Amino acid sequence: MREDREYGADSFYKGLVEHGLIVPTRVPGSFGRNAVFEDVLARFDGLINELAKNDAAELFVFPPVIDRTIIEKTGYLDSFPNLAGTVFSFFGNEREAKALSAKVGEGQPWADTQGMTEVCLNPAACYPIYPTMTGTLPENGRLITMFQWVYRHEPSLEPTRMQSFRVREFVRAGSPDAVVAWRDMWLQRGVELLASLGLPAKPDVAADPFFGRTGKMLANAQIDQKLKFEVLIPVISLEKPTACCSFNYHQDKFGEVFGIRTADDQVAHTACLGFGLERCVMALFKTHGFRPAEWPSGVRARLWP
């Protein structure tokens, strides 16, 4: 058995570092990626684009920060207060700036010199698009795709659990039947795409990591209604495979919050799906080894045609 076939966070992290694929930093869950890692990621993202080329999705790119009121209006801070990252900055005068500098120079806490800004780090790839859809949708609804950096305050030495990562996201808005059918179609597509790369991908019903006691009830309801599915691949553990794709049906939540209506004046339903690009790349390294030149010919032909 090859060393990279052994499961465990420490051994996998060590292998990624030793092969130069990731570059450690002082902060857990934050690391650099080298050219090989980025090449695989770009080519995997290209396969997703190829898969969706006839869907006529609108492409948008948003910055890693979003309007802070989005997470306030959607209840994100009720469900995931531990994951949010709010941007703070200095608003003081010259005298206060000198006090800030002195605190930093003396190695003292300086958070009290900062104030909350109007933006926060984007915690979910789909969030920036919903406020832009306020009003009436076209007859067939809307389909949007995005390439997004996402932040979640979840520091960990486990390499697939990053504080900031990239997601290839698709969002569908329209009638309930159209949205659910689209979500289910893409779930099958996602499994087939990953399987075509030799990955042991399996779909399963899932729940978001809601915070606290109330969160457990929300998670159980999400599972019971089958609102969320994930595609799982063993990366760190066989017993607890890693979620590499997520497929979520929001019902009318975002339609209500942002006043999104269907062409027949009903509250629009939405669904989103996201491929965690770094996780999918890591699944490839875990399954096929740390050297892409040695991957199976069929996998290489898919990624490097």
Image (spheres, rainbow, N blue to C red):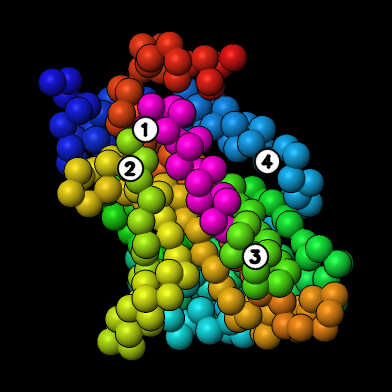
- Residue bearing the label numbered 1: 199
Tag 2: amino acid: Ile
> CA separation, marks 1 and 4?
20 Å
Q: Which mark is residue 301?
A: none
Q: Are marks 2 and 1 in contact (CB under 8 Å)?
A: yes
Where residue 3 appears, x then y in whole percent?
Answer: 16, 24
Name the secondary structure under disc 3: helix
Assess whether mark 1 and mark 3 are in contact (beta carbons under 8 angstroms).
Answer: no
Q: Residues within 10 Å of mark 1 (few under 14, many from 20)?
A: many
Viewed as shown, does residue 159 lie left or right of 34? left
**Viewer-nearest residue: 119 or 104:** 119
- Report the magenta residues as a range: 183-199
Classify mark 1: helix, strand or loop.
loop
Residue located 67% across and 51% down the image? 146
Residue at 60 percent of width and 37 percent of height = 48
Can you give x and y, in whole percent of width and height, for residue 192 in the image?
A: 48, 37
Q: In the rendered image, which residue does mark 2 sit on? A: 233
Q: Which is more N-terminal, label 4 or label 1?
A: 4
Q: How far apart, in angstroms, are the residues tagged by discs 3 and 1?
A: 27 Å
- In whole angstroms, how far apart are the C-alphas of marks 2 and 4? 22 Å
Question: In this rendering, which labeled residue sits more in front, label 3 or label 4?
Answer: 3
Between discs 3 and 1, the one toward the N terminus: 3
| Magenta segment includes 194 | yes
Q: Taking the image as drawn, is residue 121 in sight?
A: no
SS of the residue under disc 4: loop
Residue, disc 4: 52
Q: Main secondary structure of the magenta part?
A: helix
Q: Residues within 10 Å of mark 4 (few under 14, many from 20)?
A: some
Residue 144: x, y in percent? 72, 55
